[in-house]
Image (cartoon, rainbow, N blue to C red):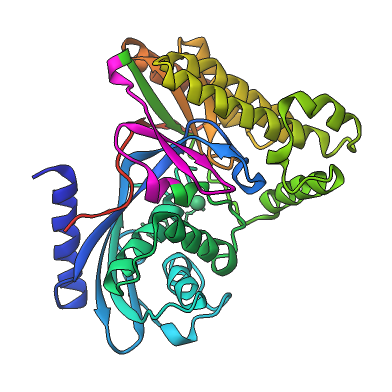
Amino acid sequence: MTGAAAEAATVRREFARIHGRSPDGVWAAPGRVNLIGEHTDYNDGFALPMALPQTTVLAARRRADGLLRLHSAQGDGAITELAVADLVPGAVAGWARYPAGVVWALRDRGLPVGGADVHLDSTVPTGAGLSSSAALECALAVAYDELYGLRLSRPELARVAQYAENAFAGVPCGVMDQMASVCCAEGAALHLDSRTLEVRQVPFDLTGHGLRLLVLDTGVAHDLADGAYAALRGGCERAAALLGLAALRDLAEAELPGALAGLPDGLAPLVRHVVTENARVGRAVAALAAGEPEALGPLLTAGHASLRDDYRVSCPETDLAVAAAVAAGALGARMTGGGFGGSVIALVPAAAAGSVARAVTDAFAAAGFAAPAVLEAVPSPGARRLG
Ligand code: ADP
Ligand code: MG
């Protein structure tokens, strides 16, 4: 049995034990790393995420009585029971607000969905900037799409999941995490236009080029629900309005010096990050299309400097992981995800993977930080039915 088939069998068996009958199906949705294009999605900009092999696997069965009964292997053992008709923002606390939010968001769009029994299990670390929240939302969304015969497109499913996280779970995230979870393909990075939700699969062959992509989870949990993320988002929107633009995506790199001169000191660095970051996405896509993935390295490191110095969303742990990885021979490294902690990705020559991971671990020990968890990012499939 492959890894996915074994995980599906386990989740199916656990579902039967917990809910007392067999599920209608089993679905999976992955976590992601974003190669480049951070804090660009809510500025209508570009990103280049790829799906991780780590997934959330979810078994579900329709119920006719309008009850949503949710169980997670990562929960406290209890089943959260909710009446679908009573779901309103603010009514559900804790992890259940993510899947319940998706059901609410589908109903809010006027779609005829009812209850279900649900059990899920995930290998995506939570709060590590690898998007376990989107994996959870998207696993539920693809399951409901089939259980209730909705036939929504992938971008529509991503929008529903984002709406659930924004309006029901109270996290003002952009759409990149959800688009990555539903649209990514094996062996490719996803070139995403967050304005149109157009996507292009860009082949990303690490092994063929003697490369590996390490994920260094600093263990510092971010909390995107706090005010910092919303404040950054608001700052970008204010800057776009001052510049007379619909969104910062509409400012070209060549227009940047003139635009910065007219902005208040607090907003100029935000604009510089977003505009240069969008340009870095374009350069990264060109490098991959030219068959030169190693050219991503300097773009990653420049992206990190921009997040650290202009956007100010890094932290001592992510800065140290990037510096130590690059000093030990990584071609480039950056924090991935919203920031304030989370994970760092490092593009490394395959032969240097062990020594780079050790160098970061040693640097953390020397600084008195807890040891980072080391994963490997392999471009993996997006959300799908497993059985
Ligand atoms: P990230 O998406 O980077 O992992 P978030 O703070 O956005 O971090 O989402 C993490 C939250 O998502 C967890 O605190 C939990 O509420 C919820 N979550 C994610 N995966 C699971 C899971 N398998 N079981 C229960 N809750 C989960
Ligand atoms: Mg999240």
The tally of labels here is 0
**What quarter of the picture does the N terminus occupy?**
top left
Q: Is residue 209 one of those drawn in magenta?
A: no
Magenta residues? 180-208
Nearer to the camera, 301 or 341: 301
**Residue lying furthest left in this view?**
1
For image coordinates 38% across by 24% down, the residue present is 213
Regarding residue 362, the answer to whether it shows in the image is no
Horizontal relation, residue 164 to residue 340: left or right: left
Q: Position of residue 379 (x, y in %)?
A: 33, 33
**What quarter of the picture does the C terminus occupy?**
bottom left
Residue 318 against residue 134 in the figure, above or below: above
Nearer to the camera, 122 or 264: 264
Nearer to the camera, 357 or 258: 258
Q: Position of residue 77 (x, y in %)?
A: 31, 68
Q: Is residue 205 one of those drawn in magenta?
A: yes
For image coordinates 30% across by 77% down, the residue present is 116
Regarding residue 338, the answer to whether it shows in the image is yes
Residue 298 against residue 371 in the figure, above or below: above
